Image: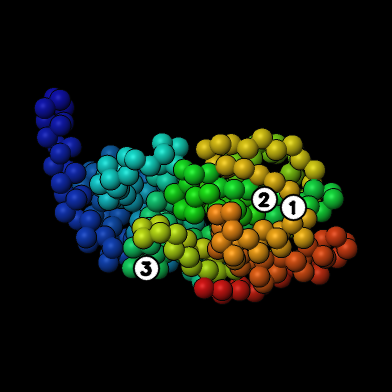
Amino acid sequence: MPPTLLLANTWASSAIVSRRVSLFVACSTTVVSRSFSKTCSGAIPRKPKSAYPAITGSRTCFSQNPIARNLIGSASNMGATVEDTTMDAVQRRLMFEDECILVDEEDHVIGHDSKYNCHLMEKIESENLLHRAFSVFLFNTKYELLLQQRSATKVTFPLVWTNTCCSHPLYRESELIEENNLGVRNAAQRKLYDELGIAAEDVPVDQFVPLGRILYKAPSDGKWGEHELDYLVFIVRDVAVHPNPEEVADVKYVSKEQLKELIRKADAGEDGIKLSPWFRLAVDNFLFDWWNKAENGTLAEAVDMKTIHKLT
């Protein structure tokens, strides 16, 4: 096809897709697939449905039709990219490249969306977006807890103190594995390296102990916030730490008494100390009891992966 005709055809197809975006939300997967096939003339091969996890709910057509979802996502995020050009380049890349796992309140996977959308309070409130997360609590063999202070460039909760590592399993095969919480363990190992430079061999996936799950919602500022189903994970290992300054401003190991003093300062507003909301929920509800059990060699007694503690 001559270049001018190809360009015209591409423009026309894009216009048709744009006009049909509003119809996709309400349509079934079958209708979207048929409509999209006509628009693209079947030029781009699609994966069979069996290649994707079972998805239900209003976001089905986006999750099971990656072609449609990518085009729609690009259009909807175009303005956001312009708006957030002042965002740190690394954080902006992660916001648009990382796909979080959307779940319902029973932790069933229902789709995926960009990290950007999952942390917009407008989206959280209007669409009730809830994504899977994890919080790692890493202790050395003296049973001191490694804390990190989040970097100043973090989009949510910059410069607050929190547990060792807090992030999200991504919508990828290795981090969607439900059996033995292996997807979360794989994600925890990945992010400990990304944020703290901890080598994978120093934190084997079989050494992570998922203890429980919490569901919470917390605004960060007027625009950003969290709405997470968070896996709380312990690991006891002596590791070499090499913090990534794009992710982490500071690190320190603390004893129980030192953590209690940090909490006191945060409560009193001393020294500008602030704690992340998920860390504070873990501290107030579980941490010290689990910490004692870890020291006493009875941590297995604390494991409860059946209950989802709704702390919102």
Q: Residue at x 59, y 66 (%)?
A: 267
Mark 1 or mark 3, which is nearer to you?
1
**Which numbered disc flags the more N-terminal residue, 3 or 2?**
3
Residue 81 x/y as whole percent? 30, 43
Q: Amino acid at mark 1?
A: Val
**Which residue occupies the foreground of this view, 104 or 230?**
230
Residue 103 drawn at (x, y percent)? 49, 64
Q: Which residue is mark 2?
A: 147
Which residue reaches farthest right?
A: 296
Q: Tell me how far mark 3 sits from mark 2, CA to CA.
A: 30 Å
Residue 245: quadrant of the picture: top right
Q: Earlier in the sequence, mark 1 or mark 3?
A: 3
Q: Amino acid at mark 2?
A: Leu
Q: Nearer the viewer, residue 141 or 130?
A: 141
Callout 1 touching callout 2 (CB < 8 Å): yes
304 up-or-down from 207: above or below: below
Q: Is residue 262 above or below residue 217?
A: above
Q: Mark 3 highlights which residue?
A: 125
Q: Earlier in the sequence, mark 1 or mark 2?
A: 2
Residue 77 - label: none
Q: Contact, CB < 8 Å: mark 1 with mark 3?
A: no
> Which residue is at a point 34% across and 63% down the rendered structure image?
122
The residue wearing badge 1 is: 254
Q: Looking at the image, can residue 111 be seen?
A: no
Nearest the camera: 216 or 175?
Answer: 216
Secondary element type, mark 1: strand
Q: Are marks 3 and 2 in contact (CB under 8 Å)?
A: no
Could you say whether the residue bearing mark 3 is in a helix, strand or loop? helix
Label 1: how many residues lie within 10 Å, few (<14), some (14-19) or many (20+)?
A: some
Q: Quadrant of the N terminus?
A: top left
Disc count in the image?
Answer: 3
**Residue found at the very far top of the displayed protein:** 2
